[in-house]
Image (spheres, coloured by chain):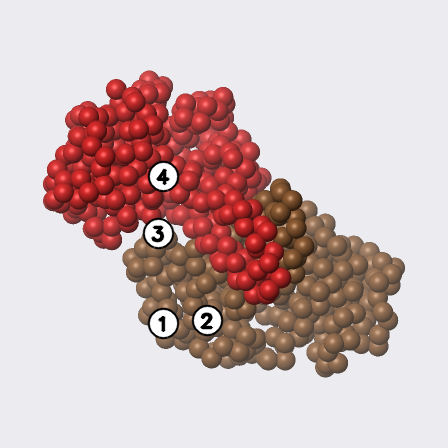
Chain colours: A red, B brown
Amino acid sequence: MILVGVDAMGGDFAPAEVVKGVNLAIAKNKEIEINLYGDQDQILKYLIPHERVHIIHTPDFVDMGEKDPIKVVRHNKSASIILAMNDLRDKKIDALVSGGPTQVIMVGGYIIVKRAEGMRRIALAPFIPSPDGRKRIILDTGGNVTLEPIDLVDFGRHATIVAKTLLGIDNPKCALLNIGTEPGKGREFDKEAFKLLEDQKEFNFIGNIESKELFTTEADIILQDGWTNNIAIKSLEGTAKTMANVLKKEIMSSLWGKIGYLFMRKNLERFKEDFNTLKVGGAMILGLNGIVVKSHGSSNQETFFQAILQAADLVSKDVLNLINRQ
Amino acid sequence: MILVGVDAMGGDFAPAEVVKGVNLAIAKNKEIEINLYGDQDQILKYLIPHERVHIIHTPDFVDMGEKDPIKVVRHNKSASIILAMNDLRDKKIDALVSGGPTQVIMVGGYIIVKRAEGMRRIALAPFIPSPDGRKRIILDTGGNVTLEPIDLVDFGRHATIVAKTLLGIDNPKCALLNIGTEPGKGREFDKEAFKLLEDQKEFNFIGNIESKELFTTEADIILQDGWTNNIAIKSLEGTAKTMANVLKKEIMSSLWGKIGYLFMRKNLERFKEDFNTLKVGGAMILGLNGIVVKSHGSSNQETFFQAILQAADLVSKDVLNLINRQ
């Protein structure tokens, strides 16, 4: 049995969507047991009671707009996410899923769960939406504004294990996000990182890629600092959103467009789903002494359902031990 | 009369599309005279001879894939772009338009045309495609991988003059591209740049914006280093291209989609044009002792036509003197 801790109070639509996601996950996977951390009265409004679901009651939780993550982690010890992180550290649960504020989860990772041996930094590693059906991991996107070049080697090693086990890729390809594909491009950081990545023999480094290739690259893992990846991913998200809005406006601007829409409504819905960031799964926090999956703040029940299965999958495939055994 | 120098040999479809663009510009604006730098025989294949167009013949040109811009600028003195830059420095022409390799134009800017007084760096400043019809300038995108914070203040001052004169905006809004909107976000560079931008009184700094707002921000001018803007803009371009491809594939994947397409073909063409980077005009090189407009490498005749008019407009509005008089 795999015991997954779920922060019932994390996410813009918590606890309703979280608890509904728990109901789905429990029904789907008979090997999962779930600890739900949060306000019992609120949880019970949505929970389908089940012998494999246990409520760890606490009235406290972290606000989604929290601006001082360090203070929360140090002083709000009865908040749902903090209780869950303590249980993860104490091995009372096998993995943790939360849709709470990223920085609180990152800081809690450093302070409570703690880093795996030899890791200088931890990384938030989401998947890029994949219209081609191929999942790509990008890291760090979690607020390591600056890194040392060697950190990218550590991240590449961890992400390679995840891509192998979770995605079933034989020899995952790692690339460095850069402003050109030739070696020697970029800042001093990138030139140094390139050399270190090329020299190591533990995983498959294929060189530089540019940000215009994020949807199409042959790479399975994309490495950069949190600053650069934040700029790249938010540009991608903003463009996707703007294009969807403009497309709708252009179609609805004429009668012929509206008639055409009646015919291709399903095609356009599929198009929208191809770029839905909520459908690709949760972001993993790599480099910790425990498995943490961060679900998007705007997650719905389907997203939480997927994140819980993903966390259980990471446990059953023994990813943590595979990483530490290297 | 405004004398614009045009590099006939710069661009993926040179000289054909360049010369056709010249034909259009000469017909459109009676105040323009043009020096066309390049191979006379090739130019004459496409040129509609006109008393206001003069060919400066040279068989040499710079390859679009040139990897060593400094060598080209120092040693290939008879290449079309280099001849044109020399004429710009010597005030034999009022402005220069080229679709040649960005790095050759930037290096030629530093070495031949030279920087305006007090400028530490020069910046490539293109417009972002504008589905909302509003032009936004983003700089630097030209290869200043790292900058000093004070450079962004210089760039903001120059771009403000351009936005005022060329775009007719009364009090242009400048923003810093960052990973969050609150002050204090980002790298040390960004924190320092934010302070300097906030403290200066020469132009209108409105604070941080995120890369998801590139299409929708109220800012007219977006400031960052070349590394960050390259990552942001190429992510935007790659996303736009992928989405257009996926949309087409989804529509054509079913009979109903194809029928719908017949009705909304015009709407979808307008949608495509909304994101066409070739339609927003050329990129300006700011910080030089001369007006240089860099047209996209894949420019067609319409793009060159627009870039030539844009260069003439910058001359007639006396932008260089307005900047230097500050």
> For residue A162, which numbered disc appears in the image?
none
Assess disc 3: are there few (<14), some (14-19) or many (≥20) residues with their C-alpha within 10 Å of its C-alpha: some
Q: Quadrant of residue B50?
A: bottom right
Q: Which residue is mark 2?
A: B157
- Is the residue under label 2 in contact with that under label 1 (CB below 8 Å)? yes
Check the image and report above or below for A323 versus B131. Answer: above
Q: Which residue is mark 4?
A: A302
First-in-chain label (1 vs 2): 2
Same chain letter for marks 1 and 2: yes
- Residue at horizontal 54 percent and vertical 46 percent from the top: A266
Q: Which residue is mark 1?
A: B200
Q: Residue B139, image x and y in percent?
A: 50, 61
Separation of disc 4 and disc 3 at Cα?
Answer: 36 Å
- Is the residue under label 3 in contact with that under label 2 (CB below 8 Å)? no
Separation of disc 4 and disc 1 at Cα?
Answer: 49 Å
Q: Which residue is mark 3?
A: B187
- Residue at horizontal 86 percent and vertical 71 percent from the top: B49
Q: Residue B231, image x and y in percent?
A: 49, 49
> Helix, strand, or loop for circle 1?
loop
> Helix, strand, or loop for circle 4?
helix
* 4 or 1: mark nearer the eye: 4
Same chain letter for marks 4 and 1: no
- Which quadrant is the N terminus of chain A positioned in? top left
- Is the residue under label 3 in contact with that under label 4 (CB below 8 Å)? no
First-in-chain label (1 vs 3): 3
Assess disc 4: are there few (<14), some (14-19) or many (≥20) residues with their C-alpha within 10 Å of its C-alpha: some
The amino acid marked with disc number 4 is: Glu
- Is the residue under label 2 in contact with that under label 4 (CB below 8 Å)? no
Separation of disc 4 and disc 2 at Cα?
Answer: 49 Å
> Helix, strand, or loop for circle 2?
helix
Specify whether B223 is left or right of A118.
Answer: right
The amino acid marked with disc number 1 is: Gln
